[in-house]
């Protein structure tokens, strides 16, 4: 991996971990959301500082969902940075429960459901036929 892609990957890890800290998740919850193996707090804290998320497609996809959810929440509430975390913790009519609870119960499926609710382009991606 060249220096530019390493910096980009480290930056994405930093963004992801900052978002999850803003969501006030515990170590076990962060590991579950990202699909990480059981990790100690010290190692989790080093992610984004000097370590990158593992180069696993499942972990990278989940981290991408987290960043896209945060981006969609920022688009919805551009003048209030705390509203995104609040939205995640309030019961949502179409989801039937709090979005964060859905994520913490269903993992990647929950991330996809919340992202599809927030970002119609993601919903289109999920429902469009795959072209070969």
Image (cartoon, rainbow, N blue to C red):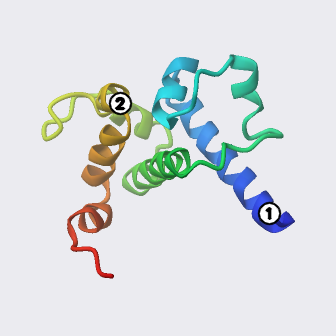
Image point 54% across, 52% down: which residue? Answer: 57
Element carrying mark 1: loop
Q: Is residue 66 left or right of residue 44?
A: left
- Sequence-wise, the earlier of marks 1 and 2 is 1
Give 68 or 75, whichever is nearer the viewer: 68
How dense is the environment of label 1, judged by Cα within 10 Å: few (below 14), some, or many (20 and up)?
Answer: few
Q: Whole-Å distance between the Cαs marked 1 and 2?
A: 34 Å
Image point 36% across, 53% down: which residue? Answer: 76
Question: Where residue 82 appears, x then y in whole percent?
Answer: 48, 36
Element carrying mark 2: helix
Q: Is residue 74 left or right of residue 120?
A: right
Report how many numbered discs are placed on residues in the image. 2
Give 105 or 84, whichever is nearer the viewer: 105
* Position of the N terminus by quadrant: bottom right
For residue 1, which numbered disc appears in the image?
Answer: 1
For residue 49, which numbered disc appears in the image?
Answer: none
Image point 36% across, 42% down: which residue? Answer: 111
Give 120 or 3, whichever is nearer the viewer: 3
């Amino acid at each position: 991996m060249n220096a530019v892609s390493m910096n980009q990957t480290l930056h994405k890890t930093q963004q992801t971990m900052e978002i999850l800290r803003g969501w006030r998740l515990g170590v076990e919850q962060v590991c579950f959301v990202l699909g990480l193996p059981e990790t100690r707090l010290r190692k989790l804290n080093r992610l984004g500082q000097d370590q990158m998320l593992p180069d696993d497609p499942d972990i990278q996809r989940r981290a991408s969902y987290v960043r896209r959810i945060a981006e969609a929440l920022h688009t919805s509430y551009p003048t209030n940075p705390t509203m995104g975390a609040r939205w995640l913790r309030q019961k949502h009519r179409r989801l039937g429960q709090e979005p964060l609870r859905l994520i913490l119960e269903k993992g990647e499926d929950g991330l996809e459901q919340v992202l599809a609710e927030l970002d119609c382009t993601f919903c289109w991606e999920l429902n469009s036929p795959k072209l070969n």
